[in-house]
Amino acid sequence: MFSISSQVLYLVSASLAGFVTVPLFLRSRKLDAIPTVVSTNSWRSAIKNLMGASGIIQEGYNKYKNAPFKIPMLYNWIVVVSGTKLLDEVRMAPDDQLSSVEGANDFFKTAFTMGHRVANEPYHLGIIKTQLTRKLPNLCPIIEDEVSASLDDMFSLQNDEWKPVVALQASRDVVSRVFNRIFVGLPLCRNPDWLKFGNQHAIDSIVSMAKMDLFPRFMLVAIFLTSTRNHVERGVEFLGPAIMERRQSADRARGGEVVDVPDDFLQWLMENGTESAERDITQRMLNMIFVSVQGTASSLTRVVYDLAAHPEYLVPLREEVDAVVRQDGWTKVAIDKMYKIDSFLKESYRFDGVSSLVMIRKVLKDFTFSDGRVVPRGCYIAAPSYAVHHDVEFYEKPDDFDPFRYIRLHRDGDDMKQQVVSLGSNFLAFGHGKHACPGRFVAATIQKIILARIVSSYDLKLDNAPAPSKSVEFGVFIGPDPNTTILLKKRSFN
Ligand code: HEM
Protein backbone atom coordinates (compact mmCIF):
# COMPACT_ATOMS: atom_id res chain seq x y z
CA MET A 1 0.00 0.00 0.00
CA PHE A 2 1.26 3.51 -0.63
CA SER A 3 0.17 6.61 1.22
CA ILE A 4 -1.19 9.82 -0.37
CA SER A 5 2.08 11.65 -0.89
CA SER A 6 2.83 14.69 -3.02
CA GLN A 7 4.16 12.28 -5.64
CA VAL A 8 0.84 10.41 -5.91
CA LEU A 9 -1.11 13.67 -6.02
CA TYR A 10 1.13 14.89 -8.81
CA LEU A 11 0.63 11.66 -10.78
CA VAL A 12 -3.15 11.78 -10.30
CA SER A 13 -3.39 15.36 -11.53
CA ALA A 14 -1.08 14.61 -14.45
CA SER A 15 -3.28 11.62 -15.35
CA LEU A 16 -6.40 13.75 -15.38
CA ALA A 17 -4.66 16.37 -17.51
CA GLY A 18 -3.82 13.63 -20.00
CA PHE A 19 -7.46 12.60 -20.38
CA VAL A 20 -8.37 16.13 -21.31
CA THR A 21 -5.53 17.00 -23.67
CA VAL A 22 -5.02 13.77 -25.65
CA PRO A 23 -8.24 13.92 -27.72
CA LEU A 24 -7.71 17.62 -28.45
CA PHE A 25 -4.59 17.20 -30.50
CA LEU A 26 -5.81 13.98 -32.09
CA ARG A 27 -8.58 16.08 -33.66
CA SER A 28 -6.22 18.86 -34.68
CA ARG A 29 -6.40 19.78 -38.37
CA LYS A 30 -3.26 21.87 -38.18
CA LEU A 31 -1.09 18.86 -38.95
CA ASP A 32 -2.79 18.19 -42.31
CA ALA A 33 -0.11 20.11 -44.24
CA ILE A 34 2.53 17.64 -43.06
CA PRO A 35 2.43 14.32 -44.97
CA THR A 36 1.75 11.12 -43.01
CA VAL A 37 3.75 7.93 -43.41
CA VAL A 38 1.73 4.86 -42.42
CA SER A 39 1.96 1.25 -43.53
CA THR A 40 -1.83 0.55 -43.74
CA ASN A 41 -3.93 2.77 -41.47
CA SER A 42 -2.89 5.04 -38.60
CA TRP A 43 -3.95 2.75 -35.75
CA ARG A 44 -2.44 -0.40 -37.21
CA SER A 45 0.66 1.57 -38.05
CA ALA A 46 0.84 3.01 -34.54
CA ILE A 47 0.72 -0.49 -33.04
CA LYS A 48 3.41 -1.63 -35.49
CA ASN A 49 5.54 1.40 -34.56
CA LEU A 50 5.39 0.30 -30.91
CA MET A 51 7.21 -2.86 -31.90
CA GLY A 52 9.82 -0.97 -33.93
CA ALA A 53 9.61 2.31 -35.79
CA SER A 54 12.83 2.26 -37.82
CA GLY A 55 11.21 0.81 -40.97
CA ILE A 56 8.53 3.48 -41.26
CA ILE A 57 10.96 6.27 -40.40
CA GLN A 58 13.30 5.07 -43.16
CA GLU A 59 10.35 4.98 -45.59
CA GLY A 60 9.41 8.57 -44.67
CA TYR A 61 13.02 9.72 -44.96
CA ASN A 62 13.36 8.15 -48.41
CA LYS A 63 10.20 9.99 -49.57
CA TYR A 64 10.47 13.34 -47.77
CA LYS A 65 14.14 13.91 -46.90
CA ASN A 66 14.74 17.54 -45.81
CA ALA A 67 10.99 18.12 -45.35
CA PRO A 68 8.84 17.25 -42.32
CA PHE A 69 6.70 14.10 -42.30
CA LYS A 70 4.65 12.59 -39.50
CA ILE A 71 4.24 9.10 -38.09
CA PRO A 72 1.51 7.97 -35.69
CA MET A 73 1.99 6.79 -32.14
CA LEU A 74 -0.97 5.21 -30.34
CA TYR A 75 -2.13 8.51 -28.81
CA ASN A 76 -0.13 11.16 -30.62
CA TRP A 77 1.99 12.17 -33.63
CA ILE A 78 5.73 12.51 -34.11
CA VAL A 79 6.83 14.98 -36.77
CA VAL A 80 10.19 13.84 -38.15
CA VAL A 81 12.60 16.45 -39.57
CA SER A 82 16.04 16.23 -41.16
CA GLY A 83 18.52 18.48 -42.96
CA THR A 84 20.61 21.30 -41.51
CA LYS A 85 17.99 24.01 -42.14
CA LEU A 86 15.08 22.32 -40.35
CA LEU A 87 17.24 20.91 -37.56
CA ASP A 88 18.65 24.38 -36.97
CA GLU A 89 15.10 25.73 -36.66
CA VAL A 90 14.35 23.02 -34.08
CA ARG A 91 17.52 23.46 -32.07
CA MET A 92 17.22 27.26 -32.00
CA ALA A 93 13.63 27.17 -30.69
CA PRO A 94 13.19 28.29 -27.07
CA ASP A 95 12.68 25.63 -24.38
CA ASP A 96 9.24 26.95 -23.49
CA GLN A 97 8.13 26.18 -27.05
CA LEU A 98 10.03 22.94 -27.87
CA SER A 99 10.95 21.12 -24.68
CA SER A 100 13.68 18.51 -24.56
CA VAL A 101 13.03 17.78 -20.87
CA GLU A 102 9.30 17.19 -21.40
CA GLY A 103 9.98 15.12 -24.54
CA ALA A 104 12.33 12.86 -22.55
CA ASN A 105 9.93 12.77 -19.58
CA ASP A 106 7.14 11.51 -21.84
CA PHE A 107 9.24 8.92 -23.68
CA PHE A 108 10.93 7.62 -20.53
CA LYS A 109 7.84 8.16 -18.27
CA THR A 110 10.30 9.82 -15.88
CA ALA A 111 7.72 11.07 -13.37
CA PHE A 112 6.42 7.53 -12.89
CA THR A 113 9.68 5.60 -12.95
CA MET A 114 12.16 8.10 -11.43
CA GLY A 115 9.88 10.42 -9.47
CA HIS A 116 8.34 13.81 -10.21
CA ARG A 117 11.18 15.84 -8.68
CA VAL A 118 13.73 14.23 -11.01
CA ALA A 119 11.36 14.85 -13.93
CA ASN A 120 10.56 18.47 -13.13
CA GLU A 121 13.71 19.80 -11.45
CA PRO A 122 16.54 18.29 -13.52
CA TYR A 123 19.35 20.15 -11.72
CA HIS A 124 21.61 17.09 -12.11
CA LEU A 125 22.10 18.22 -15.76
CA GLY A 126 24.17 21.17 -14.54
CA ILE A 127 26.32 18.88 -12.37
CA ILE A 128 26.99 16.59 -15.37
CA LYS A 129 28.02 19.58 -17.49
CA THR A 130 30.24 21.18 -14.84
CA GLN A 131 31.80 18.90 -12.22
CA LEU A 132 31.62 15.59 -14.09
CA THR A 133 32.87 16.83 -17.46
CA ARG A 134 35.50 19.21 -16.09
CA LYS A 135 36.97 16.56 -13.83
CA LEU A 136 37.52 14.07 -16.67
CA PRO A 137 41.32 14.55 -16.76
CA ASN A 138 41.50 13.57 -13.05
CA LEU A 139 39.01 10.76 -13.57
CA CYS A 140 40.87 8.98 -16.43
CA PRO A 141 43.32 7.02 -14.20
CA ILE A 142 40.43 6.11 -11.85
CA ILE A 143 38.32 4.90 -14.78
CA GLU A 144 41.25 2.85 -16.10
CA ASP A 145 41.80 1.32 -12.67
CA GLU A 146 38.16 0.24 -12.39
CA VAL A 147 38.03 -1.05 -15.99
CA SER A 148 41.15 -3.19 -15.42
CA ALA A 149 39.89 -4.50 -12.08
CA SER A 150 36.48 -5.35 -13.59
CA LEU A 151 37.95 -7.14 -16.62
CA ASP A 152 40.33 -9.12 -14.37
CA ASP A 153 37.46 -10.11 -12.05
CA MET A 154 35.16 -11.04 -14.93
CA PHE A 155 37.47 -13.04 -17.17
CA SER A 156 39.95 -15.35 -15.53
CA LEU A 157 41.42 -16.81 -18.72
CA GLN A 158 43.95 -19.62 -19.06
CA ASN A 159 46.54 -19.47 -21.87
CA ASP A 160 45.00 -19.97 -25.34
CA GLU A 161 41.52 -20.69 -23.94
CA TRP A 162 38.66 -19.11 -25.95
CA LYS A 163 35.94 -18.17 -23.48
CA PRO A 164 32.33 -17.42 -24.59
CA VAL A 165 31.11 -14.12 -23.17
CA VAL A 166 27.54 -12.76 -23.35
CA ALA A 167 28.34 -9.33 -24.77
CA LEU A 168 25.49 -7.23 -23.30
CA GLN A 169 25.79 -8.72 -19.81
CA ALA A 170 29.57 -8.25 -19.75
CA SER A 171 29.28 -4.65 -21.07
CA ARG A 172 26.66 -3.83 -18.46
CA ASP A 173 28.79 -5.30 -15.67
CA VAL A 174 31.91 -3.35 -16.50
CA VAL A 175 30.10 -0.10 -17.38
CA SER A 176 28.01 -0.14 -14.21
CA ARG A 177 31.08 -0.72 -12.04
CA VAL A 178 32.93 2.16 -13.70
CA PHE A 179 30.02 4.62 -13.43
CA ASN A 180 29.46 3.61 -9.83
CA ARG A 181 33.13 4.26 -9.08
CA ILE A 182 32.59 7.83 -10.37
CA PHE A 183 29.16 8.19 -8.78
CA VAL A 184 29.51 6.66 -5.31
CA GLY A 185 33.17 5.58 -5.09
CA LEU A 186 34.80 2.61 -3.39
CA PRO A 187 33.78 0.25 -1.82
CA LEU A 188 30.08 0.54 -2.80
CA CYS A 189 30.92 0.50 -6.53
CA ARG A 190 32.11 -3.10 -6.12
CA ASN A 191 29.26 -4.30 -3.89
CA PRO A 192 27.55 -7.01 -6.01
CA ASP A 193 24.17 -6.48 -4.28
CA TRP A 194 24.19 -2.75 -5.07
CA LEU A 195 25.21 -3.37 -8.69
CA LYS A 196 22.55 -6.07 -9.08
CA PHE A 197 19.95 -3.76 -7.58
CA GLY A 198 20.91 -0.91 -9.98
CA ASN A 199 20.52 -3.30 -12.90
CA GLN A 200 17.16 -4.57 -11.65
CA HIS A 201 15.97 -0.99 -11.21
CA ALA A 202 16.89 -0.29 -14.85
CA ILE A 203 15.15 -3.42 -16.16
CA ASP A 204 12.00 -2.76 -14.12
CA SER A 205 11.96 0.86 -15.28
CA ILE A 206 12.21 -0.18 -18.93
CA VAL A 207 9.41 -2.75 -18.49
CA SER A 208 7.21 -0.11 -16.81
CA MET A 209 7.92 2.36 -19.64
CA ALA A 210 6.99 -0.24 -22.25
CA LYS A 211 3.70 -1.12 -20.49
CA MET A 212 2.77 2.54 -20.14
CA ASP A 213 3.24 3.07 -23.88
CA LEU A 214 0.03 1.09 -24.35
CA PHE A 215 -2.08 3.69 -22.53
CA PRO A 216 -2.72 7.39 -23.02
CA ARG A 217 0.28 9.10 -21.55
CA PHE A 218 -0.97 9.96 -18.11
CA MET A 219 -3.81 7.51 -17.51
CA LEU A 220 -4.21 6.65 -13.83
CA VAL A 221 -3.42 3.04 -14.64
CA ALA A 222 0.19 4.09 -15.15
CA ILE A 223 0.61 4.38 -11.39
CA PHE A 224 -0.21 0.71 -11.01
CA LEU A 225 2.01 -0.32 -13.93
CA THR A 226 5.05 1.25 -12.31
CA SER A 227 7.00 -1.51 -10.63
CA THR A 228 9.78 0.79 -9.39
CA ARG A 229 7.78 2.41 -6.55
CA ASN A 230 9.50 0.41 -3.83
CA HIS A 231 12.96 0.69 -5.33
CA VAL A 232 13.77 3.96 -3.61
CA GLU A 233 13.42 2.43 -0.13
CA ARG A 234 15.75 -0.39 -1.17
CA GLY A 235 18.17 2.17 -2.66
CA VAL A 236 18.21 4.12 0.62
CA GLU A 237 19.35 0.94 2.41
CA PHE A 238 22.54 1.12 0.31
CA LEU A 239 23.08 4.87 -0.02
CA GLY A 240 21.64 6.05 3.32
CA PRO A 241 24.71 5.05 5.40
CA ALA A 242 27.07 6.76 2.91
CA ILE A 243 24.97 9.95 2.97
CA MET A 244 24.88 9.90 6.76
CA GLU A 245 28.64 9.33 7.04
CA ARG A 246 29.39 12.22 4.65
CA ARG A 247 27.14 14.53 6.68
CA GLN A 248 28.92 13.55 9.87
CA SER A 249 32.33 14.26 8.32
CA ALA A 250 31.07 17.63 7.07
CA ASP A 251 30.05 18.43 10.68
CA ARG A 252 33.47 17.40 11.91
CA ALA A 253 35.13 19.53 9.21
CA ARG A 254 33.06 22.51 10.37
CA GLY A 255 34.40 21.82 13.87
CA GLY A 256 37.95 22.22 12.52
CA GLU A 257 38.85 18.54 11.99
CA VAL A 258 40.72 17.62 8.79
CA VAL A 259 38.59 15.07 6.90
CA ASP A 260 38.79 13.34 3.51
CA VAL A 261 36.03 14.68 1.30
CA PRO A 262 35.01 12.21 -1.45
CA ASP A 263 35.14 13.60 -4.99
CA ASP A 264 32.23 11.77 -6.62
CA PHE A 265 28.77 12.48 -8.04
CA LEU A 266 27.00 11.73 -4.76
CA GLN A 267 29.14 14.36 -3.04
CA TRP A 268 28.55 16.92 -5.83
CA LEU A 269 24.80 16.32 -5.54
CA MET A 270 24.90 16.72 -1.74
CA GLU A 271 26.92 19.95 -2.02
CA ASN A 272 25.16 21.56 -5.00
CA GLY A 273 21.71 20.02 -5.12
CA THR A 274 18.46 21.40 -3.78
CA GLU A 275 17.42 18.21 -1.98
CA SER A 276 18.42 17.05 1.48
CA ALA A 277 16.16 14.04 2.16
CA GLU A 278 18.00 10.72 1.73
CA ARG A 279 15.08 9.44 -0.32
CA ASP A 280 15.30 12.32 -2.84
CA ILE A 281 19.07 12.07 -3.20
CA THR A 282 18.80 8.31 -3.67
CA GLN A 283 16.10 8.66 -6.33
CA ARG A 284 18.26 11.11 -8.29
CA MET A 285 21.28 8.81 -8.03
CA LEU A 286 19.18 5.89 -9.32
CA ASN A 287 18.13 8.06 -12.26
CA MET A 288 21.77 8.96 -12.97
CA ILE A 289 22.76 5.30 -12.92
CA PHE A 290 19.88 4.48 -15.25
CA VAL A 291 20.62 7.18 -17.87
CA SER A 292 24.36 6.55 -17.78
CA VAL A 293 24.67 2.80 -17.68
CA GLN A 294 21.97 1.73 -20.15
CA GLY A 295 22.98 3.82 -23.20
CA THR A 296 26.68 3.34 -22.60
CA ALA A 297 26.40 -0.44 -22.10
CA SER A 298 24.13 -0.87 -25.16
CA SER A 299 26.46 1.01 -27.47
CA LEU A 300 29.54 -0.66 -26.00
CA THR A 301 27.98 -4.05 -26.75
CA ARG A 302 27.77 -3.00 -30.40
CA VAL A 303 31.35 -1.78 -30.41
CA VAL A 304 32.60 -5.10 -29.01
CA TYR A 305 30.41 -7.00 -31.45
CA ASP A 306 31.73 -4.92 -34.37
CA LEU A 307 35.31 -5.61 -33.34
CA ALA A 308 34.65 -9.35 -32.97
CA ALA A 309 33.02 -9.32 -36.42
CA HIS A 310 36.01 -7.44 -37.93
CA PRO A 311 39.08 -8.83 -36.10
CA GLU A 312 41.32 -7.44 -38.87
CA TYR A 313 41.14 -4.07 -37.05
CA LEU A 314 42.51 -5.50 -33.80
CA VAL A 315 46.18 -5.07 -34.74
CA PRO A 316 46.04 -1.41 -35.91
CA LEU A 317 43.98 -0.47 -32.83
CA ARG A 318 46.36 -2.35 -30.56
CA GLU A 319 49.42 -0.68 -32.12
CA GLU A 320 47.91 2.75 -31.52
CA VAL A 321 47.04 1.98 -27.89
CA ASP A 322 50.43 0.41 -27.12
CA ALA A 323 52.23 3.44 -28.59
CA VAL A 324 50.29 6.21 -26.82
CA VAL A 325 50.13 4.42 -23.46
CA ARG A 326 53.88 3.73 -23.61
CA GLN A 327 54.41 7.47 -24.06
CA ASP A 328 51.74 9.05 -21.84
CA GLY A 329 50.34 6.30 -19.57
CA TRP A 330 46.57 5.96 -19.06
CA THR A 331 46.07 9.73 -18.98
CA LYS A 332 43.57 12.04 -20.68
CA VAL A 333 46.44 13.13 -22.98
CA ALA A 334 46.88 9.52 -24.11
CA ILE A 335 43.13 8.92 -24.51
CA ASP A 336 42.85 12.07 -26.67
CA LYS A 337 45.56 10.69 -28.99
CA MET A 338 43.67 7.43 -29.62
CA TYR A 339 42.28 8.57 -32.98
CA LYS A 340 41.67 5.08 -34.35
CA ILE A 341 39.86 4.01 -31.19
CA ASP A 342 37.72 7.17 -31.42
CA SER A 343 36.98 6.60 -35.11
CA PHE A 344 36.04 2.95 -34.44
CA LEU A 345 33.57 4.01 -31.73
CA LYS A 346 32.05 6.68 -33.94
CA GLU A 347 31.56 4.27 -36.83
CA SER A 348 29.88 1.78 -34.52
CA TYR A 349 27.50 4.51 -33.26
CA ARG A 350 26.76 5.54 -36.85
CA PHE A 351 26.31 2.03 -38.12
CA ASP A 352 24.02 0.75 -35.36
CA GLY A 353 22.83 3.50 -33.02
CA VAL A 354 20.69 3.03 -29.91
CA SER A 355 17.64 4.90 -31.21
CA SER A 356 15.97 5.46 -34.59
CA LEU A 357 14.95 8.98 -33.46
CA VAL A 358 16.87 11.55 -31.39
CA MET A 359 16.32 15.22 -30.45
CA ILE A 360 12.84 14.36 -29.21
CA ARG A 361 11.11 17.65 -28.39
CA LYS A 362 7.61 18.12 -26.99
CA VAL A 363 5.75 21.01 -28.58
CA LEU A 364 4.52 23.23 -25.71
CA LYS A 365 3.32 26.08 -27.96
CA ASP A 366 2.37 25.67 -31.64
CA PHE A 367 5.62 25.62 -33.67
CA THR A 368 5.79 27.04 -37.21
CA PHE A 369 8.61 26.05 -39.58
CA SER A 370 9.97 28.74 -41.93
CA ASP A 371 7.92 27.23 -44.80
CA GLY A 372 4.73 27.97 -42.81
CA ARG A 373 3.96 24.40 -41.73
CA VAL A 374 2.67 24.15 -38.17
CA VAL A 375 3.17 21.49 -35.52
CA PRO A 376 0.49 21.92 -32.86
CA ARG A 377 0.97 21.91 -29.10
CA GLY A 378 1.12 18.44 -27.60
CA CYS A 379 2.84 16.70 -30.56
CA TYR A 380 6.52 15.71 -30.71
CA ILE A 381 9.29 16.67 -33.13
CA ALA A 382 12.37 14.44 -33.62
CA ALA A 383 15.30 13.74 -35.96
CA PRO A 384 15.78 10.40 -37.80
CA SER A 385 19.31 9.54 -36.66
CA TYR A 386 19.54 6.04 -38.12
CA ALA A 387 18.28 7.13 -41.56
CA VAL A 388 20.66 10.12 -41.65
CA HIS A 389 23.58 7.91 -40.60
CA HIS A 390 22.87 5.60 -43.55
CA ASP A 391 22.42 8.33 -46.18
CA VAL A 392 24.87 8.08 -49.10
CA GLU A 393 24.83 11.88 -49.39
CA PHE A 394 26.73 12.09 -46.09
CA TYR A 395 28.57 8.77 -45.86
CA GLU A 396 30.34 7.03 -48.73
CA LYS A 397 29.14 3.40 -48.91
CA PRO A 398 26.97 3.91 -45.81
CA ASP A 399 26.11 0.24 -45.44
CA ASP A 400 29.78 -0.74 -45.17
CA PHE A 401 31.30 -0.81 -41.69
CA ASP A 402 34.38 1.35 -42.28
CA PRO A 403 35.87 2.11 -38.83
CA PHE A 404 38.70 4.41 -39.93
CA ARG A 405 36.57 6.59 -42.24
CA TYR A 406 36.82 9.59 -39.86
CA ILE A 407 40.61 9.38 -39.74
CA ARG A 408 40.67 9.82 -43.51
CA LEU A 409 38.58 12.98 -43.04
CA HIS A 410 41.09 14.57 -40.61
CA ARG A 411 42.44 17.56 -42.46
CA ASP A 412 44.65 20.47 -41.48
CA GLY A 413 44.15 20.27 -37.76
CA ASP A 414 40.36 19.82 -37.82
CA ASP A 415 40.67 16.50 -35.93
CA MET A 416 38.28 17.77 -33.28
CA LYS A 417 35.42 18.07 -35.77
CA GLN A 418 35.65 14.36 -36.60
CA GLN A 419 35.63 13.19 -32.99
CA VAL A 420 32.83 10.97 -31.72
CA VAL A 421 31.68 13.70 -29.30
CA SER A 422 31.37 16.45 -31.94
CA LEU A 423 27.87 17.32 -33.02
CA GLY A 424 26.32 18.15 -36.40
CA SER A 425 23.18 17.61 -38.44
CA ASN A 426 24.76 14.54 -40.13
CA PHE A 427 26.03 12.84 -36.97
CA LEU A 428 23.24 12.62 -34.43
CA ALA A 429 24.23 9.80 -32.07
CA PHE A 430 24.24 12.22 -29.12
CA GLY A 431 21.56 14.56 -30.48
CA HIS A 432 22.26 18.13 -31.54
CA GLY A 433 22.11 21.65 -30.15
CA LYS A 434 21.95 22.89 -26.59
CA HIS A 435 20.23 19.74 -25.35
CA ALA A 436 22.69 17.30 -26.91
CA CYS A 437 23.78 14.61 -24.48
CA PRO A 438 25.79 16.27 -21.68
CA GLY A 439 27.13 12.84 -20.65
CA ARG A 440 28.80 12.19 -24.02
CA PHE A 441 32.27 13.24 -22.88
CA VAL A 442 32.32 10.84 -19.96
CA ALA A 443 30.52 8.06 -21.91
CA ALA A 444 33.00 8.28 -24.81
CA THR A 445 36.01 8.44 -22.46
CA ILE A 446 34.85 5.34 -20.58
CA GLN A 447 34.17 3.45 -23.80
CA LYS A 448 37.53 4.46 -25.27
CA ILE A 449 39.34 3.21 -22.17
CA ILE A 450 37.37 -0.06 -22.18
CA LEU A 451 38.00 -0.62 -25.90
CA ALA A 452 41.68 0.28 -25.50
CA ARG A 453 42.02 -2.11 -22.56
CA ILE A 454 40.27 -4.89 -24.49
CA VAL A 455 42.48 -4.57 -27.59
CA SER A 456 45.63 -4.42 -25.50
CA SER A 457 44.75 -7.45 -23.36
CA TYR A 458 42.58 -9.82 -25.43
CA ASP A 459 41.97 -11.42 -28.82
CA LEU A 460 38.31 -11.70 -29.76
CA LYS A 461 36.11 -13.18 -32.46
CA LEU A 462 32.46 -14.00 -33.07
CA ASP A 463 30.94 -17.19 -31.77
CA ASN A 464 29.43 -18.27 -35.06
CA ALA A 465 27.18 -21.06 -33.92
CA PRO A 466 24.37 -20.07 -33.91
CA ALA A 467 24.81 -17.02 -36.16
CA PRO A 468 24.43 -13.96 -33.92
CA SER A 469 21.70 -11.45 -34.63
CA LYS A 470 22.46 -7.90 -33.68
CA SER A 471 19.45 -5.81 -32.70
CA VAL A 472 16.08 -5.84 -31.01
CA GLU A 473 13.71 -2.91 -31.46
CA PHE A 474 11.00 -1.44 -29.29
CA GLY A 475 9.36 1.79 -30.46
CA VAL A 476 12.17 4.18 -31.33
CA PHE A 477 14.72 2.31 -29.20
CA ILE A 478 17.18 -0.11 -30.76
CA GLY A 479 18.96 -2.47 -28.36
CA PRO A 480 21.61 -5.11 -28.88
CA ASP A 481 20.45 -8.71 -28.88
CA PRO A 482 20.87 -9.70 -25.21
CA ASN A 483 21.96 -13.23 -26.17
CA THR A 484 24.79 -12.36 -28.55
CA THR A 485 27.95 -14.17 -27.49
CA ILE A 486 31.52 -13.40 -28.49
CA LEU A 487 34.68 -15.42 -27.87
CA LEU A 488 37.54 -13.94 -25.88
CA LYS A 489 41.07 -15.13 -25.13
CA LYS A 490 44.25 -13.69 -23.68
CA ARG A 491 46.21 -11.61 -26.19
CA SER A 492 48.80 -13.69 -28.01
CA PHE A 493 52.13 -11.91 -28.41
CA ASN A 494 53.52 -13.92 -31.34
C1 HEM B 1 26.96 6.14 -25.26
C2 HEM B 1 26.13 6.54 -24.31
C3 HEM B 1 25.08 7.58 -24.52
C4 HEM B 1 24.32 7.86 -25.62
C5 HEM B 1 24.35 7.18 -26.99
C6 HEM B 1 23.47 8.99 -25.27
C7 HEM B 1 22.58 9.59 -26.14
C8 HEM B 1 21.80 10.69 -25.82
C9 HEM B 1 20.91 11.35 -26.73
C10 HEM B 1 20.68 10.96 -28.20
C11 HEM B 1 20.31 12.36 -26.05
C12 HEM B 1 19.25 13.34 -26.61
C13 HEM B 1 19.94 14.58 -27.13
C14 HEM B 1 19.02 15.58 -27.81
O1 HEM B 1 17.81 15.55 -27.53
O2 HEM B 1 19.48 16.40 -28.63
C15 HEM B 1 20.81 12.33 -24.70
C16 HEM B 1 20.42 13.20 -23.71
C17 HEM B 1 20.86 13.13 -22.42
N1 HEM B 1 21.83 12.29 -21.93
FE1 HEM B 1 22.85 10.88 -22.95
N2 HEM B 1 23.72 9.35 -23.98
C18 HEM B 1 24.70 8.52 -23.48
C19 HEM B 1 25.27 8.57 -22.22
C20 HEM B 1 24.90 9.44 -21.23
C21 HEM B 1 25.53 9.54 -19.93
C22 HEM B 1 26.75 8.72 -19.49
C23 HEM B 1 24.86 10.48 -19.22
C24 HEM B 1 25.11 11.00 -17.83
C25 HEM B 1 26.30 11.07 -17.28
C26 HEM B 1 23.80 10.99 -20.08
C27 HEM B 1 22.89 11.97 -19.72
C28 HEM B 1 21.99 12.55 -20.59
C29 HEM B 1 21.06 13.62 -20.19
C30 HEM B 1 20.90 14.19 -18.77
C31 HEM B 1 20.36 13.99 -21.34
C32 HEM B 1 19.28 15.08 -21.47
C33 HEM B 1 19.93 16.39 -21.90
C34 HEM B 1 18.99 17.59 -21.97
O3 HEM B 1 17.78 17.40 -21.98
O4 HEM B 1 19.49 18.74 -22.02
N3 HEM B 1 23.86 10.34 -21.29
N4 HEM B 1 21.73 11.31 -24.58
Image (cartoon, rainbow, N blue to C red):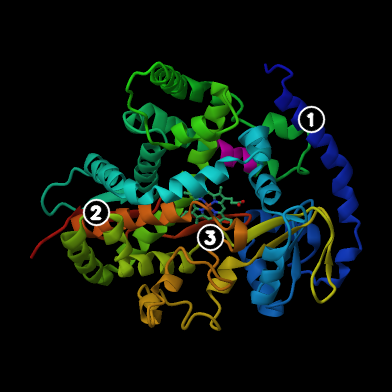
Residue 53: image quadrant is: bottom right
Residue ID at (34%, 18%): 257
Looking at mark 3, is its residue's CB closer than 8 Å to ligand 1? yes
The type of residue carrying mark 2 is: Trp
Q: Which residue is mark 2?
A: 330
Q: Categorize mark 3 by other alpha carbons within 10 Å: few (<14), some (14-19), many (20+).
A: many
Is 159 covered by the magenta stretch? no
Q: Main secondary structure of the magenta part?
A: helix
* Segment colored magenta: 203-209
Question: Is residue 37 at all visible to an observer of this figure?
Answer: no
- Residue 358 in the image: state x and y as whole percent: 61, 60
On screen, residue 186 above or below 106: above
Instruction: Measure how far apart labels 1 and 2 are at the Cα level.
Output: 51 Å
The one nearer the camera, 28 or 188, is 188
The quadrant of the picture occupied by the N terminus is top right
Q: Is residue 87 visible?
A: yes
Disc 3 marks a residue whose amino acid type is Phe
Q: Is residue 191 left or right of residue 330?
A: right
Query: In the image, is 482 to the left or to the right of 327?
Result: right
- Residue 127 appears at what percent x and percent y? 52, 43
- In the rendered image, which residue does mark 1 sit on? 12
| SS label for mark 3 | loop
Label of residue 430 in the image? 3
Q: Position of residue 85 (x, y in %)?
A: 68, 76
**Label 1 amino acid?**
Val
The residue positioned 43% from the left and 50% from the top of the image is: 134
Q: Residues within 10 Å of mark 1 (few under 14, many from 20)?
A: some
